[in-house]
Structures are given as C-alpha cells and as structure tokens.
Image: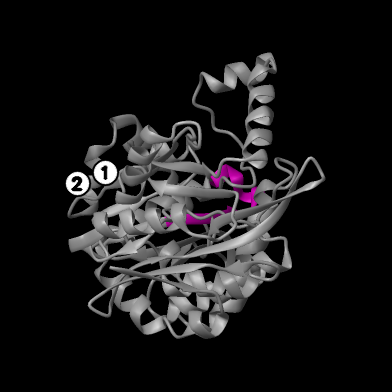
Amino acid sequence: MQIELVTSTQAFDALEADWRALEARSARGSVFLSWDWQRLWWTHYGCGRQLRILIARADNAVVGLFPLYLEHHRVARILRVRKLRPIGAGGDTSPDDLGILAEPSCEQAVAQAFVHHILTSPERWHLLDLVDLPSDSALVDCLARQAAQQPALIHRGPPNRITYGDLPANWDSYRQSLSRNRREVLGRKRRRFEQQPGARFDQIVDAAQLDPAFERLAELHRRRWQGRTDELGFTSAQYLGFHRDVMRALLERKSLLLYALEMNGDIIAMFYGFRHAQTCYYFQAGFDPQHAALSPGEVLMGYVIEAAIGAGCTRFDMLKGDYGHKRHFFQQTRQTVNIRVHRPGLIHLLYRIKQWRLERQPQPRQQQREDTAVLDAPPVAEQRA
C-alpha cells in the first residue's frame, strides 16, 4: 500500500471520480465525507489553510482517503502551532462522522497505513486534532492501540452521544413503538395543525424554489433561537454560501431533504436534512415562534419521519446534539469521539500545563449539575439545535 499526499486544489479536483467511487463502496461513508460536502467546504473555508489529503493506493487503485488540512495557531501568543485537522471541521460548521473513506475489504489496513504515515512523516505538525470520529471505526481502533503505547501523547476526549432510531416498515408500526401518551400527543398535535386554514406539508424538490426556501429556513432558524444563544446558525456569509451550495449539489443527486409546513401559503416551519444510503439525517430546522402553540417543530418531525419510512429509509439519525426533543422520537444512541495526537516537545508540554490548570479549576455549581444530568441545552458553536 502506497500513501500519496495532495496539497493543491488542482490535485484535489482530479480526485473527484475516485472519491465518488470510493464513497459509494465505503461501509462508513457519510454525507460529511462525501465529495460534495468536502469539496464545497474547502471552497468556502479553505482560505488560509493548506491541503494535506492522504491517498492510499493498492495496485494503483485508490482504496483510502483521509481528507486533512494544516492550519496555524498561537500558544501563549508566542509559539506557532501547526495543527492537522479534518476537512469539514473548523469555522462555524458542525460536521459529524468524519475520519477516513476506505475500501471495506481493507479498512483496517488503510487506517493503519494512514496512522503510520502521519506519525512518521517529516511534515512539521505539532497537533493532530481529529473530531467526530465514529467510535467503532477502524481509525479509532488503530489510534487506541497506538495510545496504549504512547499514552502521554494521544488523548481521547469524552464521547458525543447521538440519538437515532431504526425505522420499521410502515408508519403505523412506528407509531405503535411509541408510548401510548406520546402517540396520543403527536396525533393530537397533527390533527390540530391540519385543522388550520391552508395547512400543508411539502417537500422542496424544484431547483427554482431552492433559494427562497433556503432564505426562509435561515430566517426561521434565527427567529427560533434569537435571544437563546450567542451562536446562531445561518448568520455568517461563509455559512450561508456553503449551505446554499451544498443544498444545490445534494438536490441534484436527490440526497437533499428539505421539508416545510405551510399555513395559508406561508411557511411556518422547515426541516433541513440529508439522505445517505438508507439513512435519513436531521441536520437543522427552524420555526416561527408566533405559531409555537401549534408545536410546528414536533408536527413537522412527525411528517418527516413518516416520509422517510415511505421512501424506504431504514434508519433516522438525529446527528450531534443530545437534546430532549430528539428523544421524543427515538431512543437508540451511538457515539463519536474526538482524539488529539501530540508530537513530543515544547508545544505538547504547554498543552499539558493548560489542561492541568483547567482540570484543577473548580466548576460552578450550575455546571456541576449540568454535567450530571441530561439537559435540553441551547446550541453552541459545535453542537446543533
């Protein structure tokens, strides 16, 4: 197995055919590792960063991809840190399920080859900062075994819990899987919505409707969270431009899930998600607080789940953010993890001192209570509502 390094945008573009083919075969593919998401992220967020995409080849065929970039930070305002990060992480985006794409028959070997290359490479990086790795992936397994040999240099952060549910064959079976009280509440809320003038559930599938629908989604999301968080989505020019382009690309490939609730021709709630293989993903949403009495977010989610079952999806993934409203619909959980790999030296020592000081600081009582309870918390920069 040979490892190659891609450092130019031109070479990145030349990977498209191989990337899409491997994406289709990979057992651990995700929309966040797809060609569309990764290449568009680099278009909107790559300025000031340096490409470091690793390619694994066997018999001249691409069997693995590890999309990374290099960026610079300052420690103690003096020392410059060279940090390797996954493409898709950073800025004001919030991905899930990053890591590597690999041929299923040799995923473990590909992960080992990538880790060996990074740890022995002459590239002058100080910190490999990997986020949102599926906890059961070959890459995590390989890094865990490496950590056993170098525990001081490899740190695994606390897991991120993600709510999901396996979908039954039909809507009635899903409803019967809910508690009696939950089933009655959802039914009552749906009937109340359907009694409103011009009540309608709709999917946006026409490219001509995409831009106005996107603007409405951004507006509704900001209305929903205004005053509840300092980290509103759909605000920066980069975020808006990136997601507008992602929606166009995914709509063309019939992977975009963009749904709306309407009353009298006015959209009062929207759902933004993706379909990848047989899984429906919930990424973002918003609703008009003026119609909060109708519970438009809950009603819309029920319709989307029903549509996903009707379209043949076998799983509904709520993605990152451990919020109570997600567990109204599903209770199964999976995990992603963050792993930091340091190279020995002064930079690593400063990071250890910083971490030691943070661990010794007493937590406020409120924070201590939050750490021992499952809270329906507001969104933060790296956690979606």
- Asked whether residue 364 is drawn in magenta, I would say no
Report the front residue among 289 and 360: 360
Coloration mode: one colour
Quadrant position of the N terminus in the picture: bottom left
Mark 2 neighbour class, 10 Å CA radius: few under 14, some 14 to 19, many 20 or more: few
Left or right of 366: which side holds 177? Answer: left
Q: Residue at x 58, y 71 (%)?
A: 42
Residue 303 seen from this side? no
Report the front residue among 141 and 133: 141
Left or right of 257: which side holds 109? Answer: left
| Residue placed furthest toward the right | 77
**What segment carries the magenta color?**
282-294
Report the front residue among 162 and 48: 48
Are discs 1 and 2 less than 8 Å apart at CB? yes
Helix, strand or loop for disc 1: helix
What is the CA distance from the residue labelled 1 to the residue labelled 2? 5 Å
Residue of label 2? 173
Helix, strand or loop for disc 2: helix
Residue of label 1? 175
